[in-house]
Image (cartoon, rainbow, N blue to C red):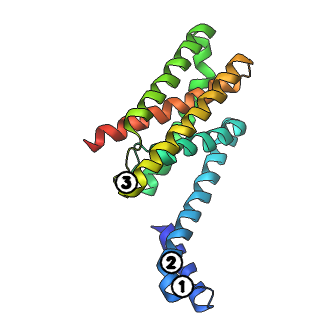
Amino acid sequence: MLYQKIACKMAEYLEREAVIEKEQKEECAYGLEMLISSICLAGMLFGVAYFLKAIDKAVLYYILFAWIRKYAGGYHAKTYIGCTSLYLLTFSFSVFMERNLLYILNLKQMQGFEFVVMISLMITVIFFAPIENVNNPIEKENKEKYYYYALIRTVIVIIINIVCMTKKIEVYHWNSICLFWVLIYMYIGKWIRK
């Protein structure tokens, strides 16, 4: 993959310049690969968001989606291209959902949907988190830590969402849609792991 080649070349350069030791090269290359892929993904997300006139949504999506999924887990595509495509399609579809759901549902129905999503996500995290990525399994000693981090992060996001609902801060619709996708990808990940 292109990210991997660029990261390896950068690590080789750092080794040649005596910035890192030979033993650190592989670890450095992996870290650089993750950094490059994250920067590219963010750039593509904000490019799509600019096109959809949804930069503010992209910021929240980027934070919310990654913040909970980092520890709760769920479905992960096997390749960077699959991951990036799915991530961008999910964002684009989320923008479409947010712009159209309030026309289809009245506010009470929408809030009902949002409460169902929040309760379902909480239950799913309690019973199933962390859902391991087939490509990157969680070490046994980290599973409990991941569970508690996922639980705490989910509770924080749900509390923020409920506060936004009660204060009528419209961002809670978007947050709920992001949580909906976290929930869906957790179930897909659980189903694939069987």
Badge 1 element: helix
The residue shown at (58%, 64%) is 35
Q: Is residue 98 above or below residue 140?
A: above
State whether residue 1 appears in this view.
yes
Could you say which disc has been placed on residue 12 in the image?
Answer: 1
Q: Return the disc, 3 or 1, that comes first in the chain's sequence.
A: 1
Q: Residue 34: x percent and y percent?
A: 53, 63
| 10 Å crowding of disc 1: few (<14), some (14-19), many (20+) | some
Would you say the residues marked 2 and 1 are in contact, meaning their CB atoms lie under 8 Å apart? yes
Q: Tag 3 or tag 2, which sits nearer the N-term?
A: 2
Q: How many angstroms separate mark 2 from mark 3 (CA)?
A: 20 Å
* Above or below, comparing residue 140 to residue 151 in the picture: below
- Secondary element at tag 2: helix
Residue holding disc 2: 8
**Dot 2: few (<14), some (14–19), or many (≥20) neighbours within 10 Å?**
some
Q: Position of residue 91 (x, y in %)?
A: 56, 38
Q: Nearer the viewer, residue 159 or 102?
A: 159
Q: Quadrant of residue 128?
A: top left
